[in-house]
C-alpha cells in the first residue's frame, strides 16, 4: 500500500468507527441494522482500492466487523436492457454505453439494499465488464455471492462505492443555466475545458431527471466519504496512468484515446453536481459526510466533516 493510500485509510477508519458507534447507540434494537457507508470519487482516484482496504482492515482484530463491499457498477442494466435504452435514445451519446444515471437497474439495487438492511440472506449481483467485447453484462444469478446465510457471520457494515453516489438532481432551470453558460463558452472558444457544453441540452436534462431516482440509494446511506479531487480534470491523468499500468502488466487495456473518451462520458455530471456534493449530500444529518480534498499526487490536504 502506498503512503498516500495508507494516509487516506488512516483518516477513514476512525471516522467510520465513530459513525458506527453512533449508529449503534441510536438504535433501540438489540441487533442494529447494518451500517451503510457510501464512497464517492472521480474515475481513477482510488475508490475501489480504498473500499477493499476498509473492508480488510475492519474485518481484522481488534474490530472484527463483518463488512461487504458493493459497487454501483454491479447494478448496471443487463446488456439487453442497455441496448434497448440506447436504441430508445439514439441521439443521446450519454446513454449509448453504461455509466450515467439511467443505465443502472434501480429496482434491483433497492431490493438488495432492503434485503441487507433487514438482515436477510442476500445474493449480491456481479457485473462482467469484459462481456460482449467490453460492452458488459450482468453475470447470471448462479454466479452471485451470498451473504447472511445461516452459517455466515451477519453483515454489520455495507460499503457501497460509486462515482455518482451522493449526487442530487438539480431543478430544470439550474441545469439550463449551467448548460447555457458552458455552451456559450464552448462556442466562443474561450478556453472551455469541460464537456457539458458539447452535449445537447435535452440530453443533459434526460440524465438529470434520471438522477432523481438515485436518491433511493443516497438516502439509504448512514454516512458518505467523498474523495474530492481538487480539480475533477485529474480524472483524465489518473485513468491514463491506470490503463498504462494495465497494458504493462497484462498486455491489454484501453488506448489513451479510449481513456479520454471514457472520462468524457462522465464529465458533464462532474460539472453539474460536484459543487453541490462538496456542500453536502445530507441536508439534515450533520457529520454524516467526510470530505477529503485530494491533490493531483493523491495526497489528502484537507479534511472536512459536513
Image: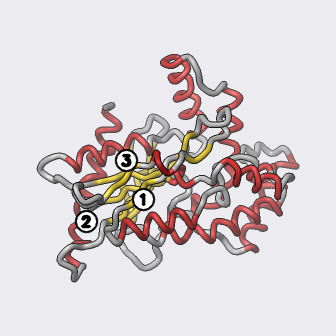
Q: Which quadrant, please, contains the C terminus?
A: bottom left
Which label was assigned to residue 10?
none
| Most foreground residue, 37 or 118 | 118
Q: Which residue position is annotated with label 2?
A: 20
Q: Which residue position is annotated with label 3?
A: 51
- Mark 3 and mark 1: Cα distance apart in space: 9 Å
- The numbered mark, 2 or 3, whose residue comes first in the sequence reads 2
- Mark 2 and mark 3: Cα distance apart in space: 16 Å
Which of the 4 image quarters holds residue 104? Answer: bottom right
- SS class of the residue under badge 1? strand
Q: Is residue 271 visible?
A: no
Q: Is residue 28 left or right of residue 162?
A: left
Q: How far across and down, in percent of the image, does residue 231 sit?
A: 56, 46
Tags 2 and 3 touching, CB below 8 Å: no
| Most foreground residue, 56 or 296 | 56
- Mark 2 and mark 1: Cα distance apart in space: 13 Å
Q: How far across and down, in percent of the image, does residue 156 sit?
A: 26, 62
Q: Which residue position is annotated with label 1?
A: 38
Amino acid at each position: 500500500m502506498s503512503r498516500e493510500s495508507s494516509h487516506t485509510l488512516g483518516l477513514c477508519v476512525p471516522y467510520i468507527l465513530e459513525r458506527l458507534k453512533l449508529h449503534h447507540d441510536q438504535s433501540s434494537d438489540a441487533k442494529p441494522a447494518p451500517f451503510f457507508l457510501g464512497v464517492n470519487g472521480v474515475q481513477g482516484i482510488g475508490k475501489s482500492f480504498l473500499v477493499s482496504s476498509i473492508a480488510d482492515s475492519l474485518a481484522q482484530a481488534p474490530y472484527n466487523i463483518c463488512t461487504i463491499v458493493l459497487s454501483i457498477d454491479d447494478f448496471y442494466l443487463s446488456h439487453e436492457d442497455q441496448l434497448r435504452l440506447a436504441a430508445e435514445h439514439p441521439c443521446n451519446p450519454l446513454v449509448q454505453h453504461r455509466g450515467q444515471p439511467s443505465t443502472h437497474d434501480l429496482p434491483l439495487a433497492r431490493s438488495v439494499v432492503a434485503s441487507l438492511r433487514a438482515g436477510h440472506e442476500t445474493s449480491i449481483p456481479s457485473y462482467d465488464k469484459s462481456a460482449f467485447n467490453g460492452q458488459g453484462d450482468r453475470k447470471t444469478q448462479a454466479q452471485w455471492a451470498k451473504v447472511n446465510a445461516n452459517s455466515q457471520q451477519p453483515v454489520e457494515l455495507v460499503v457501497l462505492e460509486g462515482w455518482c453516489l451522493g449526487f442530487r438532481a438539480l431543478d430544470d432551470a439550474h441545469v439550463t443555466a449551467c448548460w447555457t453558460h458552458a455552451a456559450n463558452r464552448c462556442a466562443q472558444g474561450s478556453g472551455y475545458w469541460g464537456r457539458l457544453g458539447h452535449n445537447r441540452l435535452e440530453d443533459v436534462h434526460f440524465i438529470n431527471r434520471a438522477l432523481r431516482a438515485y436518491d433511493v440509494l443516497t438516502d439509504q446511506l448512514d454516512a458518505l466519504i467523498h474523495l474530492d479531487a481538487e480539480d475533477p480534470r485529474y480524472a483524465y491523468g489518473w485513468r491514463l496512468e491506470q490503463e498504462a499500468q494495465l497494458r504493462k502488466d497484462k498486455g491489454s487495456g484501453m488506448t489513451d484515446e479510449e481513456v479520454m473518451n471514457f472520462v468524457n462520458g462522465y464529465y458533464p455530471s462532474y460539472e453539474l453536481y460536484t459543487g453541490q456534493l462538496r456542500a453536502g449530500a445530507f441536508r439534515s444529518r450533520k457529520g454524516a459526510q467526510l470530505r477529503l480534498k485530494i491533490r493531483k499526487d493523491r495526497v489528502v490536504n484537507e479534511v472536512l466533516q459536513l
